[in-house]
Each structure stands twice: as structure tokens, then as C-alpha cells.
Image (tube, grey):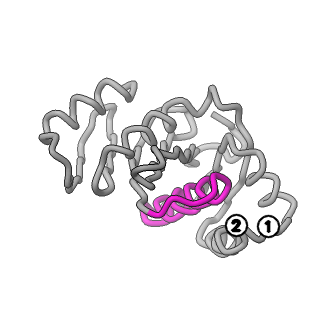
């Protein structure tokens, strides 16, 4: 984890993954770790409005920021493997495809005491990639929250044929906790 913000900070790794062209679906995976690198929360978010990959990555970052604000986290660093979006955020460059999402990200920054953005290699985003892949099979958002090293909250409303236990087993296989 990047130690840029120090103690009490959270690192969020968002990821967007496109499903098949038939489903017109995208999965967003977001993983949050504390300043020591310990897993704090993860979200698997399905989206049913499949757009350009760069836009989906920007929307995943925006969603991560919204989740962090809702959690009340004051110091965050967004670590994304989408260099094109991170560069546009850091250099304040506009892009017609993602301009609305970029504007939202700029506005959301004001909800935090500190908010930084960093590019990370894809291999460091593997858990969020797995969450995004899992989200492709969901009908609604799954929130997992960790405390004292244990899973304590699971909120889900699934509209799939798979039973709740099946989805829990899938998440246990995919996430290293």
C-alpha cells in the first residue's frame, strides 16, 4: 500500500470489467485497505449500462470515492490500473468521453481531508479485478465489510438463479480473507 497519506488513511483499488456483448453488462470491483495494507471492505457492483472502457474505469473510480465518503473516511488514495484516467485526473485534462465522470471526481475530492490518485500496475489490482468479475454475475451490489480480520457485514439482494450460499462460496474462493 502506498504510505503517502499515513495512518488512518485508506487505499481504494477500483476496477471495471466488461462482460460479453450479449449481456451489455459491466462489473465494478472496489477493494479498500487500511494504511497497513489490511483488507477493510470490498464492493462488487454490477452496471447494466455498458460504455467505453475508459468511461467505465472513471465511473469505477467515482463509485469508489462515493463509497469512501459514505464510510466517513477522511484520507484516501485511489490506486487504479487505468493510466489514461489517472493521468487525466492528475493533469486536469479533459476528455469528451469521460468529462462528466471527471467533473464528478473533482467535486467528490472536496469530501475528503486528503484525496490522492495513483497509477498502479494491473498485478496490484488483482483482488479488485476478481470482485469486478464476480459483479458480472450479480443483479445488485454486494458489500463486504471487515473488522478485526473477520467478515462482519454482508448486504446483498441477488436476482440470479444462484442461491445465496453459492454466491458466498464464490466470493470466498475469489477474495483472500
Closer to the camera in the image, 64 or 4: 64
Residue hosting label 2: 98
Decide whether residue 51 is among the magenta residues: yes
Decide whether residue 64 is among the magenta residues: yes
Q: Are marks 2 and 1 in contact (CB under 8 Å)?
A: yes
Location of the N terminus by quadrant is: top right
Give above or below for 47 relative to 163.
below
Q: Residue at x 65, y 44 (%)?
A: 79
Q: How far apart in space, not on screen, are marks 2 and 1 (Cα)? A: 6 Å
Quadrant of residue 131 within the rendered picture: top left
Residue 177 image position (x, y, % from top left):
35, 26
Quadrant of residue 108 within the rendered picture: bottom right
Closer to the camera in the image, 42 or 51: 51
Give above or below for 59 relative to 33.
below
The disc label shown at residue 22, or none? none
Q: Residue at x 64, y 60 (%)?
A: 55
The disc label shown at residue 95, or none? 1
Amino acid at each position: 500500500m502506498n504510505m503517502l497519506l499515513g495512518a488512518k488513511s485508506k487505499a481504494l483499488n477500483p476496477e471495471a470489467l466488461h462482460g460479453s456483448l450479449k449481456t451489455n453488462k459491466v462489473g465494478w470491483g472496489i477493494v479498500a485497505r487500511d494504511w497497513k495494507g489490511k483488507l477493510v471492505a470490498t464492493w462488487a457492483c454490477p452496471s447494466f449500462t455498458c460504455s467505453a472502457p475508459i468511461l467505465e474505469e472513471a465511473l469505477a473510480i467515482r463509485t469508489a470515492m462515493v463509497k469512501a465518503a459514505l464510510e466517513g473516511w477522511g484520507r484516501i488514495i485511489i490506486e487504479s490500473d487505468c493510466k489514461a484516467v489517472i493521468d487525466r485526473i492528475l493533469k486536469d485534462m479533459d476528455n469528451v468521453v469521460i468529462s462528466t465522470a471527471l467533473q464528478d471526481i473533482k467535486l467528490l475530492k472536496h469530501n475528503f481531508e486528503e484525496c490522492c490518485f495513483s497509477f498502479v500496475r494491473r498485478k496490484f489490482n488483482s483482488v479488485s479485478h476478481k470482485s469486478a468479475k464476480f459483479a458480472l454475475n450479480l443483479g445488485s451490489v454486494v458489500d463486504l465489510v471487515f473488522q478485526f480480520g473477520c467478515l462482519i457485514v454482508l448486504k446483498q439482494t441477488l436476482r440470479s438463479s444462484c442461491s445465496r450460499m453459492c454466491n458466498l462460496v464464490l466470493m470466498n474462493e475469489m477474495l483472500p480473507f
